[in-house]
Amino acid sequence: MEIDFQDLDPRLRYKILTSTVIPRPIALVTTRSADGVDNAAPFSFFNVFGENPPIIILGLQAREPGLPKDTTRNIRETSEFVVHLVDRALAEAMNDCAVNFPENISEFDSTKISRAKCQRVKVSRIAEAPIAFECRRTLILQLNETRDLAIGEILYMHAREGIIDPESMNLNLSKYNIVGRLFDDLYAPVLETFAHTRLDHSGWLEKFRS
Ligand SMILES: Cc1cc2nc3c(=O)[nH]c(=O)nc-3n(C[C@H](O)[C@H](O)[C@H](O)COP(=O)(O)O)c2cc1C
């Protein structure tokens, strides 16, 4: 099958992209409006794109042309946001945060997430999240009237006790029950792992000499 993306309706592009590029990590993003309302919403067009500077990018769709989501408006107005990763225990509340609550209603007061303080930004973070990254906006790229990319730098990180070894900084996978998004309403935990050692060229030659 061949698909010409330029001729394809954007809704079908969405369907194909979100069902083939899987699993995607989920950023549960908190922001605070200029009026002081704490907001939370999930975004799976999301990833990290480097460590120096430590860069996070979110793909933000408008509700309709020219009408941004609360998250987009808040990042534009305050420059601050917190990205939380989502584990199995937080998954239901994450989905509840995707409800289109009116902008003056906080997801913290309507769903089962509770506030914790941040160190570098004024935004509230989610106490129940296994990992939280406090971020400051680097820039927002407005690609068209329905699609923004928010690029932010990670300033500070919170990790639940036991997930990261403080000596080695290694992850304890057995304590990190993270979930990814598949498509539609489907999610998946990390079920099994396997390893491939990455070789340099001399290691590569050695492997095939034996
Ligand atoms: C798992 C999941 C992933 C989502 N990913 C995105 C995304 O990448 N971009 C987007 O614009 N909306 C995404 N949404 C929809 C938003 O979360 C939803 O529109 C939300 O109401 C926005 O809230 P806000 O207006 O408070 O920012 C996703 C929803 C779910 C449940």
Image (tube, rainbow, N blue to C red):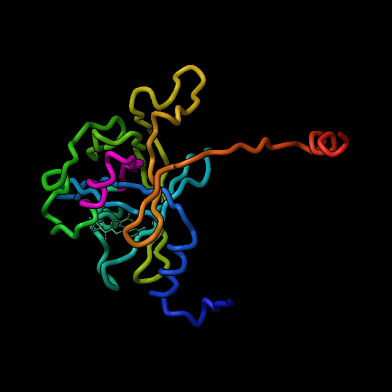
Picture residue at 47% right of the left edge, 28% below the top: 171
Query: Percent x, y for residue 195?
Result: 61, 37
Quarter of the image where the N terminus is located: bottom right
- Residue lying at the far front of the rendered structure: 192
Picture residue at 27% right of the left edge, 64% below the top: 68
Query: Percent x, y for residue 168?
Result: 51, 20
Picture residue at 24% right of the left edge, 55% below the top: 98
- Residue lying at the far right of the rendered structure: 209
Left or right of residue 104, residue 116 in this image? right
The foreground one among 28 and 96 is 96
Which image quadrant for residue 174?
top left
- Residue lying at the far top of the rendered structure: 167
Query: Percent x, y for residue 28?
Result: 31, 46
Query: Percent x, y for residue 77?
Result: 26, 53
Picture residue at 49% right of the left edge, 24% below the top: 169
Name the quarter showing ligand 1: bottom left
User: Does residue 140 lie above or below 67 as drawn?
Assistant: above
The foreground one among 33 and 62 is 62
How many discs appear? Answer: 0
Which image quadrant for residue 162?
top left
User: Does residue 108 lie above or below 24 as drawn?
Assistant: above
**Magenta run includes residue 91:** yes
**Magenta run includes residue 28:** no
Left or right of residue 66, residue 4 in this image? right
Quarter of the image where the C terminus is located: top right
Q: Which segment did they paint magenta?
A: 79-96
